[in-house]
Every structure is written in structure tokens, then in C-alpha cells.
Image (tube, helix red, strand yellow):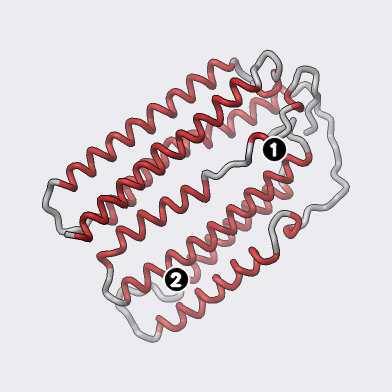
């Protein structure tokens, strides 16, 4: 009974955090930009009429409201129905992927936005940055060291668990999976450090801040994923799989907290988007 109540509480938190709290922050942030940096004064910021972006924001808001209401309907059903808990983890995961749909659509629209911004840029000035970028310019050695320690500890942990011959244990496939995930995160960091910038008007300092922000996100995600997989193996090994729906939901909320953190607007240079400012591609 207590576990069911805890599951309902944690699942309610997942609905509120991912479909209400974070979308609300994003909506307030974008509305602040609309109000503080209007198209009339900052035309480079809007390659399309601002109303197009307002309509997109309204769609994003409605999608999250619908998903939030559907989530609470699901919780009400779970609360007043008898169930074994066998499908709880599947429910948590399915809900998360549904909640992620609006975020995915926003990412797609952002990519389209930056492509259009590059196409409509008034200049193609190319500026060479004389200072080469190095990873430690953006993240602390401690963060990198911590991620490496967690990764090595995970490998040792897998070697230790392998000796028990659990029939469900994936063995070194876990190491291969975590290694692939870490390589993917490393690829994102390198692409942001050395790839072509999306925003042709973005200032040098803002780009460096963005690279640092994304790099720290990827390192935190690497640590979070590795620790979560370790916890899942431990819970299965000590026959506590009934707790996994709770840990999975908390993990998804942690991923959202890390992934949806954004740079502070007040630290960004919006002067580059004013009328007459040239792009530096």
C-alpha cells in the first residue's frame, strides 16, 4: 500500500515537473524575449514574423497542457484501480516519451529557425578565432575526473557482478552500452566546440558560454546515466525490482532538470540582433 502511494506521488511529480514546471519556464523565457527584444528593434532575431513564433509557443503550451491532463487522468485511474505493479515501470517510461514529444518538436523548430536565420543573414563576414578551444576552457578538470572515476567504477562493478551469473544480467553489454552513450555525449561536446555555429549573429562570449553550458550538461548526463544503470542492477540483484518504477521516474525527472537548464538571458548579448548588425558566419 505504501509503495503504491509513493508511486502515485512520484508519478505525479513527473507529470508536474516535465509537463508543467519546465514548459512554464520555457514559455516565460520566450515571452520575456518577445517583450524585451521586439522585432521592430531586433529584426535579426526574427527571420520570420514574430506572430509565427507566438503561434508555435501557443501550440507548445497546449500540447503540454493536454499531456499533463492525460497524465493526471492516468494517475486517477491507477489510484482507484487494482493492479499488480507489473506494468508500472512501462507506464513511467511511456509517459516520459510522450512528455518528451513537445521538447523534441521544439528542438526541430529551433534547427529550422537557425537555418532560416543563416539564410536571411545580411552578411557573410568570416571571423577567425585566434584562440583554440580546449575542453578545460569550458569545464573543470574535477568534473571530467569525476565522470572518468564513475565510468571506471562502473566497469569494475560490472566485473564484480559478472561472477554471480545472474540469468538476467547483460554482463559486458552494459559496459558497451555506457561506453556508446559516453561517446555520443563526447561527440556532442566536440561538435559544439569545433562545429559551425548555428546562430550567425551570436557573439564570441555567448558562444563560449553556450559551449561550456552544453559540455557541463553532457558530463552531468554521463554521470547520471551511469549511476542509474548501476542502481538498476543493484535493485535487480537484491530482489528489489518493485522499487524500480520509483527510481526510473525520479531518474527521468533528473534528466529533465539537467537537459532543460538554459543559459541566463540577462547574461546574453542581444545587441548583435539589432538593425544594421552584420552576421559573422
184 or 43: nearer the viewer:
43
Rendered location of residue 264, percent (x, y)? 63, 39
Quarter of the figure that contains the N terminus: bottom left
- In the picture as drawn, the residue positioned furthest to the right comes out as 130
Is residue 18 positioned above or below 181 on the image? Answer: above
Label 1, on which residue? 267
213 sits to left or right of 131: left
- The Cα–Cα distance between marks 2 and 1, rounded to whole angstroms, is 43 Å
- In the picture as drawn, the residue positioned furthest to the left comes out as 82
For the point 56% across and 58% down, the residue is 220
197 or 248: nearer the viewer:
248
Crowding around mark 1 (Cα neighbors within 10 Å: few <14, some 14 to 19, many 20+) is: few
Q: Secondary structure at mark 2?
A: helix
Is residue 132 positioned above or below 164 on the image? Answer: above
Crowding around mark 2 (Cα neighbors within 10 Å: few <14, some 14 to 19, many 20+) is: few
Rendered location of residue 7, percent (x, y)? 26, 55
Give whichever of discs 2 and 1 has the lower sequence position: 2
Is residue 96 positioned above or below 234 on the image? Answer: above
Q: Indicate which disc residue 173 carries.
A: 2
Rendered location of residue 28, percent (x, y)? 52, 29
Corner quadrant of residue 239:
bottom left
Q: Indicate which disc residue 240 carries.
A: none
Is residue 188 positioned above or below 179 on the image? Answer: above
Corner quadrant of residue 169:
bottom left
For the point 26% across and 39% down, the residue is 72
Question: Total of numbered circles in the picture?
Answer: 2
Amino acid at each position: 500500500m505504501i509503495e503504491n502511494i509513493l508511486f502515485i506521488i512520484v508519478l505525479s511529480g513527473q507529470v508536474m515537473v516535465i509537463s508543467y514546471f519546465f514548459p512554464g519556464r520555457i514559455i516565460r523565457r520566450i515571452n520575456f524575449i518577445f517583450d524585451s527584444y521586439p522585432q521592430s528593434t531586433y529584426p535579426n532575431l526574427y527571420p520570420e514574423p514574430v506572430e509565427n513564433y507566438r503561434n508555435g509557443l501557443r501550440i507548445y503550451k497546449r500540447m503540454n497542457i493536454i499531456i499533463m491532463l492525460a497524465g493526471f487522468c492516468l494517475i486517477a485511474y491507477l489510484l482507484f484501480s487494482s493492479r499488480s505493479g507489473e506494468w508500472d515501470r512501462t507506464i513511467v517510461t511511456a509517459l516520459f516519451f510522450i512528455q518528451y514529444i513537445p521538447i523534441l518538436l521544439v528542438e526541430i523548430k529551433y534547427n529550422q529557425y537557425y537555418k532560416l536565420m543563416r539564410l536571411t543573414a545580411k552578411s557573410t563576414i568570416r571571423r577567425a578565432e585566434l584562440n583554440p578551444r580546449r575542453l578545460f576552457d569550458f569545464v573543470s578538470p574535477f568534473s571530467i575526473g569525476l565522470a572518468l572515476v564513475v565510468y571506471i567504477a562502473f566497469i569494475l562493478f560490472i566485473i564484480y557482478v559478472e561472477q554471480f551469473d545472474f540469468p538476467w544480467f547483460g554482463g559486458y553489454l552494459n559496459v558497451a552500452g555506457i561506453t556508446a552513450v559516453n561517446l555520443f555525449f563526447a561527440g556532442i561536446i566536440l561538435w559544439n566546440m569545433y562545429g559551425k555555429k548555428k546562430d550567425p549573429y551570436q557573439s564570441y562570449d555567448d558562444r563560449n558560454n553556450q559551449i561550456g553550458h552544453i559540455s557541463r550538461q553532457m558530463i552531468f548526463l554521463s554521470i547520471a546515466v551511469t549511476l542509474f544503470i548501476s542502481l538498476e542492477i543493484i535493485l535487480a540483484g537484491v530482489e528489489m525490482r518493485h522499487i524500480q518504477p520509483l527510481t526510473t521516474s525520479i531518474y527521468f525527472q533528473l534528466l529533465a532538470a539537467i537537459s532543460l537548464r538554459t543559459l541566463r538571458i540577462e547574461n546574453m548579448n542581444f545587441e548583435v540582433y539589432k538593425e544594421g548588425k552584420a552576421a559573422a558566419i
